Amino acid sequence: MNKTDLRTALEAVVRDGELPVRVTPKASRNAVVVEPGEAGAVVRVYVTTVPENGKATKDVVKLLAKAMGRPKSALALVRGETARDKVFRLND
């Protein structure tokens, strides 16, 4: 999936300004993947960072912001600070 397709797929997952994601820390690579699911598309973010002291969450924000073509400040964590399932609010 190229950058434009990924950006379009991510924007399609946003509901009411919120983007739910599933994070996999300590992965072998950093990646943002949009997979089709039963209840709509699922965004999975893979980061190589260990999940301690919010390091993995910071890397998730960096990857999502880059994939969406937005600044990091446009993403705010709403739920899931220490969980794998996180919800981000998109600020315009």
Image (cartoon, helix red, strand yellow):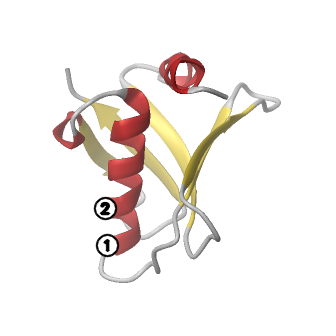
Residue denoted by label 1? 54
Asked if the residues shown at circle 1 and circle 2 are in contact, with their CB atoms under 8 angstroms apart, the answer is: yes
The image shows residue 35, relative to residue 82, as above or below, that is: above
Q: Residue at x 30, y 49 (%)?
A: 77
Q: Position of residue 35 (x, y in %)?
A: 73, 35
Is residue 55 in view from this perspective? yes
Taking depth in this image into account, of 32 and 80 the one nearest to the observer is 32
Residue denoted by label 2? 58
Q: Residue at x 79, y 32 (%)?
A: 37
Name the secondary structure under disc 2: helix
Taking depth in this image into account, of 51 and 26 the one nearest to the observer is 26
Instruction: Residue 38: name its quadrant.
Output: top right
- In the picture as drawn, the residue positioned furthest to the front comes out as 2
The image shows residue 67, relative to residue 31, as above or below, that is: above
Is residue 79 in view from this perspective? no
- Residue 54 lies left or right of residue 11; in this view the side is left
How many other residues sit within 10 Å of disc 1, few (<14), some (14-19) or many (≥20)?
Answer: few
The image shows residue 85, relative to residue 88, as above or below, that is: below
Location of the C terminus (image quadrant): top left
Location of the N terminus (image quadrant): top right
- Residue 63 lies left or right of residue 30; in this view the side is left
Q: Residue at x 41, y 55 (%)?
A: 60
What's the amino acid at mark 2? Lys
The image shows residue 35, relative to residue 92, as above or below, that is: below
What's the CA distance linking mark 1 and mark 2? 6 Å
Taking depth in this image into account, of 84 and 68 the one nearest to the observer is 68
